[in-house]
Image: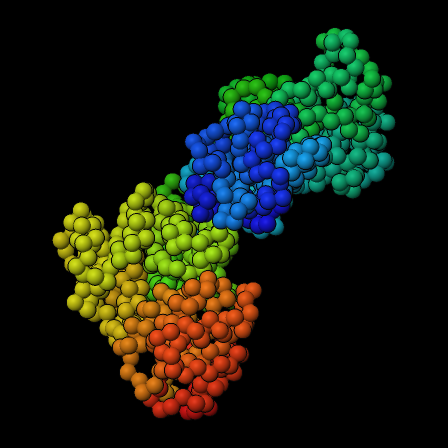
């Protein structure tokens, strides 16, 4: 039993448009004696003993039997027989849940190979999800072999991953609030910074600091002496104190202030290095040492009697207040302190780190020092009713508790908090104060502001131990995206088997012509405002995110290919317009997609991501693309090369919008009206109307532009000024006119593509038509044969070469099948075999007769265009 392919989906995908974060594991079960749970005696009992709660959840999806949905994994079901892939799915989910990652959705189904299953399940943290897949396979295999399984190290490992990778409760609350408002987010690579929104409209958060947070405010808050001085000057009650660097300075401070005192590092935060309520010299000296771990300069100030309160101000307004209590136990007269701590930690609300609303109490060195100062140990028994504080600070992360007191705040203290945030200059501000009663004005209760914090934690407000939870993330998102503003930029996404690159470029050209700062992705690179910033096939999720993360972009046009969707899903959750050009037999047999219908399901992911009021632009001439309209939540527009198409007529009569090639024009149909954009022959990309496939692309681009709100004349001008060239459309119908012959460079790489190219060549006059073609290593043999057969019909002569990457096939095999296909309809076709592409191009440039048209179906576009540029220079 082994995983033969493991993928991570980070956006809408073939496996689910709704559930974005998925692990897709292809598991080979052939080594198992039986691939069903009832094939191995005792397997069900061993599994349920190991995971007694696995039957208590009902993940959505389908079982390996394709049976009813939402079936729990029960002992009865296991004994009746469940596929092991389905069992692995449940185990992977349960492992994550036991490590405090509540995930539930999954499905499994057979792959095309016998004994192989696809196991698909949700994850919270990517690394944990991948590890859960591996562990689930290991566990199920061990249970099949009756081997002992120790879950603890696996759960501990997943727990550690969660603590390393999880946003944290504060960040998560903001991200969740943003997501609830349909604001997209991206975690920037190798950082804890989260981008909310896209392009020019993005905002960023880092914990609870934002891109609006004042650097000066953070600096002030980070220097406690400066903070205290500024607050004191503004009439805010603060403790008297001073800064010391040595024991001598500490003695002088104590002489001036007296006991009790507090010591804390000048540049500290989150209570690190702080010691409170110091009553004697020995403890004071130890407090100095503890503080100097974090800062040479140590603040010594009066200890203010009272309770510890945290006030939260966002965008100048008090949002929440909490009374914080340090981690503590209450004696019962018979239990040791260690036993009391264990009892407190039994509270189901407590967990490791930030996994739950409260953190488990740890008896660390700080706790032991407190016990030692009171002549106690962990084995000591506290009298009944006696409260023992185990930490000197009231931080939630060290086991403290919080009680919401927002509604008890006196108006004076509300104003005080809002003034403090403004004085320090923080958009999100945590204010620590000591007071006996928060409902009494601070200046009357002899309380004081102790500290001001940039990046304050939200957990105590989101999920207080007692009192009303506060949605403190909402005012943060309100501040980042005020009413009337938007977090998004328009996104037009394009997919299909052929034509998607040209259509993407046409749309990007139209959008840019209206002054938008466009970012677009294609199979040859990523472009930001017309500048190519990345080269290569950039049609996957990471490339889309590259554009959406760019702070200068206010419009995105994204080519979206099959490979990226199957590899990691889409790089966005929703788009405004999705264009599907066509679906044909291409790349079949790769990544478990074997039929054109399955390929259509992959391409159909894109229109299913269109926002409710957006548009899916579909090719009405393609049965599979037309069928994608069923079940969509968005509006649908159609395009067709057939002006008499019944589908178009029915659609328009029902009030729909369409683009049609009629009487030589690209025309928009809406209700009973026709809006003629222009004659298709006037668009350079159509080569005077000979390139029907590019007329089709113009229809899709014009319709997308119309639906995006562009005027007829804007669309017309853009299509007339889009001139195909090696720089604008590299490898797509690049024409070089040399003195004796003409060369066309194109990327036709499948049967559907070369079929449409054949129509263009039939309308192209030439004395001799020569093609430089290659075998297709990553296609099925029947696809290669079909491609070569049509190439044989087109050309009078063929130079047969080989791609650099044969994708596991031999050069001899590809040569044989290509030659066979080329001669199926032309047995006497002249074929010259030259293996290297550049050598093949040199040969054809040297031998092409006058009046010939040479077509180069190129793999290495950049090198091919460079060679033609050199040839052009040498022959002019």
Q: Nearer the viewer, residue 26 or 105?
A: 26
Evaluate whether residue 483 shows in this view: yes
Question: How many numbered dots are placed on residues in this image?
Answer: 0
- Is residue 247 found left or right of 14 in the rendered image? right
- Is residue 183 found left or right of 170 in the rendered image? left
Image colouring: rainbow
At x 27%, y 74%, the residue is 690
Image quarter of the C terminus: bottom left
Q: Measured from the top left, where is residue 182 in percent x and y?
A: 41, 41
Image quarter of the N terminus: top right
Q: Measured from the top left, where is residue 530 in percent x and y?
A: 43, 67
At x 74%, y 22%, the residue is 390
Q: Nearer the viewer, residue 671 or 87?
A: 87
Vertical order, 210 against 781 (above or below):
above
At x 39%, y 60%, the residue is 585
Vertical order, 602 against 728 (above or below):
above
Vertical order, 351 against 743 (above or below):
above
- Is residue 757 found left or right of 121 in the rendered image? left
- Residue 392 occupies which quadrant of the picture? top right
In the displayed orientation, state which residue is furthest to the left: 672
- Is residue 6 found left or right of 871 in the rendered image? right
Evaluate whether residue 228 shows in this view: no
Vertical order, 520 against 482 (above or below):
below
Q: Measured from the top left, where is residue 755 in percent x and y?
A: 33, 69
At x 28%, y 69%, the residue is 692
Q: Nearer the viewer, residue 435 or 777?
A: 777
Q: Measured from the top left, where is residue 505 in percent x and y?
A: 37, 65
Q: Nearer the viewer, residue 394 or 805?
A: 805
């Amino acid at each position: 039993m082994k995983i033969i392919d493991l993928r991570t989906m980070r956006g809408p995908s073939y496996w689910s448009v709704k559930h974005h974060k998925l692990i897709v594991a292809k598991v080979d079960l052939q080594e198992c004696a039986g691939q069903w749970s009832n094939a191995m005696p005792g397997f069900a009992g061993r599994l349920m003993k190991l995971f007694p709660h696995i039957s208590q959840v009902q993940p959505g999806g389908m079982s390996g039997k394709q049976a009813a949905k939402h079936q729990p994994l029960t002992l009865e079901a296991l004994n009746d027989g469940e596929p092991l892939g389905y069992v692995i799915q449940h185990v992977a989910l349960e492992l994550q849940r036991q490590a405090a990652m509540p995930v539930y959705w999954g499905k499994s189904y057979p792959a095309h190979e016998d004994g192989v299953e696809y196991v698909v399940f949700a994850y919270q943290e990517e690394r944990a999800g991948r590890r859960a897949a591996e562990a689930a396979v290991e566990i199920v295999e061990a249970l099949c072999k009756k081997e002992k399984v120790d879950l603890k190290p696996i759960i501990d490992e997943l727990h550690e991953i969660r603590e390393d990778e999880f946003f944290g409760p504060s960040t998560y609350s903001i991200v969740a609030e943003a997501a609830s408002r349909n604001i997209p987010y991206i975690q920037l690579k190798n950082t804890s910074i989260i981008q909310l929104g896209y392009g020019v409209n993005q905002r960023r958060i880092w914990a609870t600091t934002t891109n609006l947070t004042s650097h000066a405010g953070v600096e002030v808050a980070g220097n406690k002496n400066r903070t205290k001085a500024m607050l004191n000057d503004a009439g805010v009650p603060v403790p008297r104190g001073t800064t010391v660097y040595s024991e001598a300075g500490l003695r002088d401070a104590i002489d001036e202030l007296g006991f009790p005192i507090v010591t804390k590092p000048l540049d500290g935060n989150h209570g690190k290095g702080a010691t409170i309520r110091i009553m004697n010299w020995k403890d004071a000296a130890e407090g100095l040492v503890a503080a100097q771990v974090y800062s040479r300069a140590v603040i010594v100030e009066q200890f203010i009697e009272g309770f510890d309160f945290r006030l939260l101000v966002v965008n100048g307004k008090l949002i929440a207040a909490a009374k914080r209590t340090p981690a503590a136990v209450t004696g019962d007269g018979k239990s040791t302190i260690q036993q009391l701590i264990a009892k407190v930690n039994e509270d189901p609300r407590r967990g490791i780190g930030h996994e739950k609303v409260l953190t488990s109490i740890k008896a660390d060195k700080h706790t032991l020092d407190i016990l030692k100062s009171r002549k106690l140990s962990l084995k000591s028994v506290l009298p009944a009713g006696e409260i023992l504080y185990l930490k000197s600070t009231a931080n939630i992360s060290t086991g403290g508790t919080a009680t919401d007191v927002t509604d008890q705040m006196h108006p004076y203290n509300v104003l005080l908090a809002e003034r403090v945030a403004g004085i320090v200059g923080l958009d999100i501000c945590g204010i620590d104060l000591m007071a006996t009663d928060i409902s009494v004005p601070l200046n009357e209760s002899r309380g004081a502001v102790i500290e001001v914090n940039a990046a304050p934690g939200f957990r105590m407000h989101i999920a207080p131990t007692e009192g009303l939870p506060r949605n403190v993330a909402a005012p943060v998102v309100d501040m980042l995206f005020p009413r009337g503003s938007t977090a998004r930029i328009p996104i037009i996404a394009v997919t299909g088997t052929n034509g998607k690159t040209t259509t993407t470029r046409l749309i990007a050209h139209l959008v840019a012509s209206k002054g938008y700062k466009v970012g677009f992705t294609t199979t040859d690179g990523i472009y930001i405002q017309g500048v190519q910033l990345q080269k290569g096939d950039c049609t996957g999720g990471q490339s889309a995110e590259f554009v959406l993360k760019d702070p200068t972009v206010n419009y995105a046009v994204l080519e979206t290919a099959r490979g990226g969707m199957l590899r990691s899903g889409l790089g966005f959750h929703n788009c405004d317009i999705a264009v599907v050009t066509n679906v044909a037999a291409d790349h079949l047999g790769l990544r478990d997609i074997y039929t054109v219908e399955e390929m259509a399901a992959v391409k159909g992911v894109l229109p299913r991501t269109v926002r409710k009021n957006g548009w899916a632009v579909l090719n009405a001439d393609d049965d599979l693309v037309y069928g994608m309209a069923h079940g969509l939540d968005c509006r649908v527009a159609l395009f067709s090369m057939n002006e008499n198409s019944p589908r178009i007529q029915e659609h328009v009569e029902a009030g729909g919008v369409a683009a049609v090639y009629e009487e030589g024009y690209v025309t928009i149909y809406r209700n009973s009206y026709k809006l003629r954009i222009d004659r298709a022959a006037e668009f350079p990309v159509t080569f005077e109307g000979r390139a029907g496939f590019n007329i089709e692309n113009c229809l899709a681009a014009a319709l997308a532009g119309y639906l995006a709100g562009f005027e007829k004349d804007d669309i017309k001008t853009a299509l007339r000024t889009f001139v195909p060239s090696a720089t604008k459309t590299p490898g797509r119908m690049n024409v070089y006119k040399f003195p004796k012959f003409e060369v066309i460079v194109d990327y036709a790489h499948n049967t559907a593509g070369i079929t449409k190219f054949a129509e263009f060549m039939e309308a192209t006059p030439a004395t001799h038509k020569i093609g430089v073609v290659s075998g297709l290593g990553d296609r099925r043999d029947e696809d290669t044969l079909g491609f070569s057969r049509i190439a044989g019909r087109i050309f009078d002569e063929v130079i047969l070469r080989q791609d650099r990457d044969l994708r596991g096939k031999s050069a001899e095999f590809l040569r044989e099948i290509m030659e066979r296909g080329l001669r199926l309809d032309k047995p006497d076709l002249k074929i010259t075999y030259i293996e290297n592409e550049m050598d093949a191009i040199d040969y054809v440039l040297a031998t092409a007769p006058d009046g010939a048209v040479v077509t180069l179906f190129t793999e290495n576009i950049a090198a091919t265009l460079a060679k033609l540029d050199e040839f052009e220079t040498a022959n002019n």
